[in-house]
Amino acid sequence: MPNTIPDEPSLGLLVSIACRLDHGLLVPGHYDRVADQFAGIPHPTHLQVFEARLADARRAYEEIAGHGFYRFDREDEYVALLEAARAGA
């Protein structure tokens, strides 16, 4: 069966994924208000956080669409990474 996932995600899908990763994005200006609480301490703006989460969303989409690092034949290697981290915790 051919891959039916588009190579390029829609912007709406990326925004949805970003908001799923960071619910603070659903509150307009949330991170700007957080930055106000830490006057004098550099803190990213709401837009900067949103853009960063969009980049995360794009990377997640690439993995799902088969354009990332994941390969079915390497499943055991990826699981071993988690198991090693858990063993070292």
Image (tube, rainbow, N blue to C red):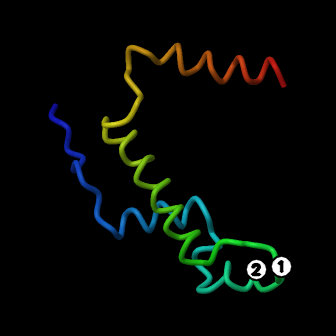
Q: Decide which of 84, 51 is in the foreground and name it.
A: 51
Q: Which disc, if any, is residue 34? A: 2
Q: Which disc, if any, is residue 86? A: none
For the point 53% across and 70% down, which residue is it? 50
For the point 43% across and 47% down, which residue is it? 59
Residue 48 against residue 35 in the figure, above or below:
above
> In the rendered view, does 33 fall on the left or right side of 49?
right
The residue that mark 1 highlights is 38
Looking at the rendered structure, the kind of residue marked 1 is: Phe
Dot 1 crowding, Cα within 10 Å, few <14, some 14–19, many 20+: few
The reply to whether discs 2 and 1 touch (Cβ–Cβ < 8 Å) is yes
**Residue 71, percent from left and from top:** 37, 23
**Residue 89, percent from left and from top:** 84, 25
Tell me the element at label 2: helix
> In the rendered view, does 32 fall on the left or right side of 50?
right
- Give the label, 2 or 1, closer to the camera: 1
Q: Decide which of 45, 10 is in the foreground and name it.
A: 45
For the point 46% across and 57% down, which residue is it? 55
Q: Decide which of 26, 35 is in the foreground and name it.
A: 35
